[in-house]
Structure formats: structure tokens, C-alpha cells
Image (cartoon, grey):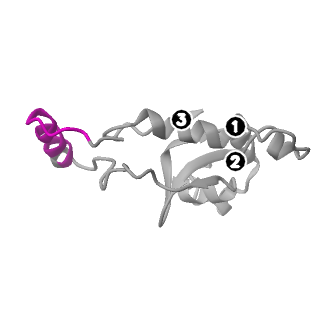
Amino acid sequence: MLLISCDFLEIRPHWIQTLVTAASPAPNRNELSQAVGPLAVAYRHSHWEPTPALYHGRAFTRIAQTNINQCGPGINNGFSGSMQRILDLLHATALSLPVDWPETPQFNSPEQLNAYTRGRHAGTPAPKP
């Protein structure tokens, strides 16, 4: 499953292709985890970038079987672990950030979104892959 946050400003097709390639099962391997691919593939630098990322359906089973105290506090007896801890728990495959990864990939305020939108409408070209 491809997980993308709703506040991501731009997604590059080659970022997704890189994730898909890394998530593909390795040929000629006998280990189950290698035969069906990793539980998660995400970009990582000083911390995980949990979106965009790929999560195998088995990841949700693994999360459900985990003591929620390992991943963060629960809310209303539900799972609410941090994505950083979840990716660690899943032993996610870490990929280096793409060279064209933006300095600020998401907006966290209306002002940031407006500034981005103004720049795009003013003819500021998107960075080239």
C-alpha cells in the first residue's frame, strides 16, 4: 500500500518507482521475508520520512500483534504509535532521500501552503528530477 500524507506539496513519479523497486521481492531467496518483500520501505535521513512510503499488508498484522507500549501511547485503547517507531518496529527498508527531495516537503500551516501556492503561480518552476 502506498501511503501519502495529505499535506505533501509534490510527489515525483521516480520517488514512487524507487520505493516499488526496493519493495520488490528479491529473486532466488529462501527466506520468507525476502521471498515476499519487506514489511515497509521508506526514505530516511536523520529520521524516517513515513510518507510517501510503501507498506505491505503483513505490516498491519505485525502492528496489531505488537504491544502498543512499544510504539507509543494508545488512545481509547487503540493503537496510536508514532510512525518513526512503527517503521523501526517493522525493520523497514531505509532508502536515502532522492536528490530532488525538497527542503520542506510538507506544509504545516496555511501560511506555508499559501507561500508555496504563490510561488507556483508566480511561475516558479518545480525542481527538475
Image side of residue 22 versus residue 49, left or right: right
**Quick check: 15 above or below 98?**
above
Q: Which residues are magenta?
A: 112-126
Q: Position of residue 53 (x, y in %)?
A: 54, 43
Q: Tell me the distance, in whole angstroms, between the alpha carbons under discs 2 and 1.
A: 21 Å
- For mark 2, give the secondary structure: helix
- For mark 1, give the secondary structure: loop
Residue type beneath disc 2: Ile
Residue type beneath disc 1: Ser
Specify which label sits upstream in the sequence, 2 or 1: 1
Quarter assignment of residue 122: top left
In front of the other: 38 or 97: 97
Mark 1 packing: few (<14 Cα in 10 Å), some, or many (20+)? some
Q: Tell me the distance, in whole angstroms, between the alpha carbons under discs 3 and 2.
A: 25 Å
In front of the other: 44 or 58: 44
Residue at point 89% right, 47% down?
31
Give the residue furthest to the bottom.
46
Specify which label sits upstream in the sequence, 3 or 1: 3
Residue at point 60% right, 55% down?
94
Mark 3 packing: few (<14 Cα in 10 Å), some, or many (20+)? few
Residue type beneath disc 3: Gln
Residue at point 81% right, 45% down?
34
Q: Which mark is residue 24?
A: 1
Residue highlighted by disc 2: 63
Residue highlighted by disc 3: 17
Q: Quadrant of the N terminus?
A: top right
Quarter assignment of residue 13: top left
